[in-house]
Amino acid sequence: KMLPTSRGFDTFFGYLGAGISYTSHAVEGTPSSPSTFTFDGVDYELYDMVDCNATSTSEKDMCTTAGASLGTYSTTLFTTRAKLHIEEASITKPIYLFLAYHGVHDDDDVNATASDLSSSILKTIQAAIPSSNPMRRNFAYGLRAIDDGIATLWETIEKYRTA
């Protein structure tokens, strides 16, 4: 009953906990809430990326894990999903889109997704920030991904606004 789709939203794509890894989408564990558990001698890691649809006929099927998103940078996932919603909207049935990007703050694993950026952007960031400062470089990758995402969404809105 606390899911966004139970509180007026038609769809929800994201994570429900306090935080996740940017690319693996594993739950960020704390001492009081670990991100792993062991069952019958097998270690399991918890993941938190869900895709919810309020129009589902079964409450059990309302939310599914977004397993296909594993390994994709969360900013890229959120931009892609928001763009799809904008493209599917119509002037006769407007939408309310709430987008809260996950980054940038503790971007330890953004570097793994640097390939999402163009090679010229990568070269510019790498030339400006020495490899001896990986945290700052990762922050730059993450910030640029958000800038690119916002630009993509703005272009999509403009395209459909004037259509």
Image (cartoon, grey):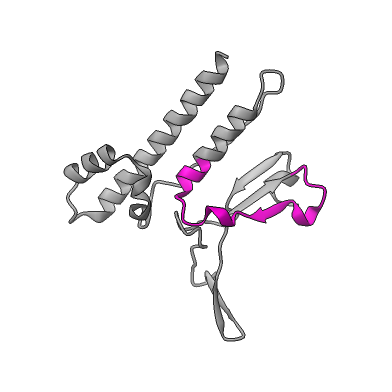
Residue extending furthest toward the bottom: 41
How many numbered dots are placed on residues in this image?
Answer: 0
Residue extending furthest toward the top: 162
Q: Residue at x 27, y 38 (%)?
A: 121
Residue 75 highlighted magenta (yes or no):
yes
User: Horizontally, is 57 left or right of 137 in the view?
Assistant: right
User: Start and end of the magenta stretch?
Assistant: 54-78
Residue 97 in sight: no
How far across and down, in percent of the image, does residue 78 sit?
52, 42
User: Horizontally, is 57 left or right of 121 in the view?
Assistant: right
Query: Image height check: is 1 above or below 90?
Result: below
Closer to the camera, 72 or 102? Answer: 72
How far across and down, in percent of the image, does residue 160 sit?
56, 20
Q: Residue at x 48, y 48 (%)?
A: 74
Residue 93 highlighted magenta (yes or no):
no
Q: Quadrant of the C terminus?
A: top right
Query: Image height check: is 80 above or below 86?
Result: below
Residue 159 in sight: yes
How far across and down, in percent of the image, does residue 156 sit?
51, 25
User: Horizontally, is 91 left or right of 149 in the view?
Assistant: right
